[in-house]
Amino acid sequence: MDYQKLLENIYQEILPYAKEGKQADYIPELAKVNPDQFGMFIHSIYGETASIEQSDTRFSIQSISKVFALAMCLSIKGDDLWKRVGREPSGTAFNSLIQLEVEHGIPRNPFINAGALVMADILFSHLDDPANDFLNFVRAVANNPTIEYNRDVANSERENGYLNAAIANLLKYHGTIENDIESVLNFYFLMCSIEMSCRELSLAFLAFANHRRKFDYAGISLTASQVKRINAIMQTCGFYDEAGEFAYFVGLPGKSGVGGGIVAIHPLQYSVAVWSPRLNSKGNSVMGMKALELLTTETKESIF
């Protein structure tokens, strides 16, 4: 497969969408990002790579970080994790309070904000140094010791994170989180602020694309079965309340973030990351979604 030529063709086809959507301006630091950027990087499990445009530009990965958090929580808690968070698609916005109240403080899945706050609480309880341990795990999976948090983004989210604070308080009321609310929120916002490039994300997610390879990074180990189950949750819950659309048009497990990044995997084939800050109404990158749709259309390959 000539991935380089494929990515170049995809880029030309999606250019008409370049001005659609807008960046996540409810987070002031993200509103400062130039929205007219695009990058894409693909990395096969056999070592083939291809890239276009700003594939080495780092951006705030936001909710993509929840996949790393899930890997750590599964390694630490095993199936006991599912006593505190579900595995079902939400069908509602990622920051919804209504569903959480109706379901008595048990988040539908780990990738909505409520579920990610529960995971932050679990990591806060079990890690000696949560901020450094989480960052070191991400660095290990990506094989890059220079990856860092963007504390300006984290602070910007905390200063404007009223809805997430409400979610955390509701979780605390129902006993779903155990630690101090401020500590959990600050750690959650820090996780979301991690900056990575498409190249770095694509390499990191090869660990999830190849479940036949041992998953053991910075003391976090997963079985092949656990890796496949993370992929299953990415397939059903990875795109907020647009997961069905992504499954229909793209057909790969993946995860998006409101920083404009999307990462997707074709199990035992490749990992691909794409970034463009302009988002649709669901919080997913307009050009990123279209690029991945074209990728699986042109290759005639998906998990289905």
Image: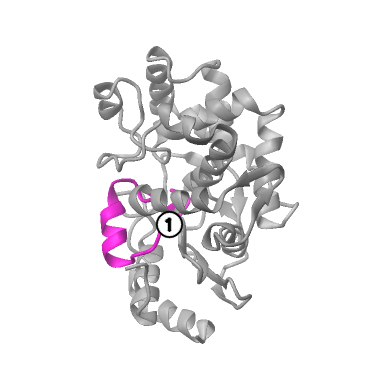
Which residue position is annotated with label 1?
254
Label 1, secondary structure: give it: strand
Residue ID at (50%, 72%):
269
206 or 19: nearer the viewer: 206
Q: Quadrant of residue 292?
A: bottom left
Closer to the camera in the image, 294 or 244: 244
Residue, x 54% and y 57% (percent of image)? 208
* Range shown magenta: 238-260
Q: Is residue 239 magenta?
A: yes
- Residue 246 is situated, as x and y percent measured from the top left of the image, at 31, 59
Residue type at tag 1: Gly
Q: What is the x, y in percent for residue 10?
A: 41, 79
Residue pictured at 54% horizontal, 41% vertical: 192
Q: Is residue 15 visible?
A: no
- Residue drawn at (38%, 27%) of the image: 163
Towards the viewer: 41 or 120: 120
- Does 125 appear above or below 188? above
Quadrant location of residue 45? bottom right
Q: Quadrant of the C terminus?
A: bottom left
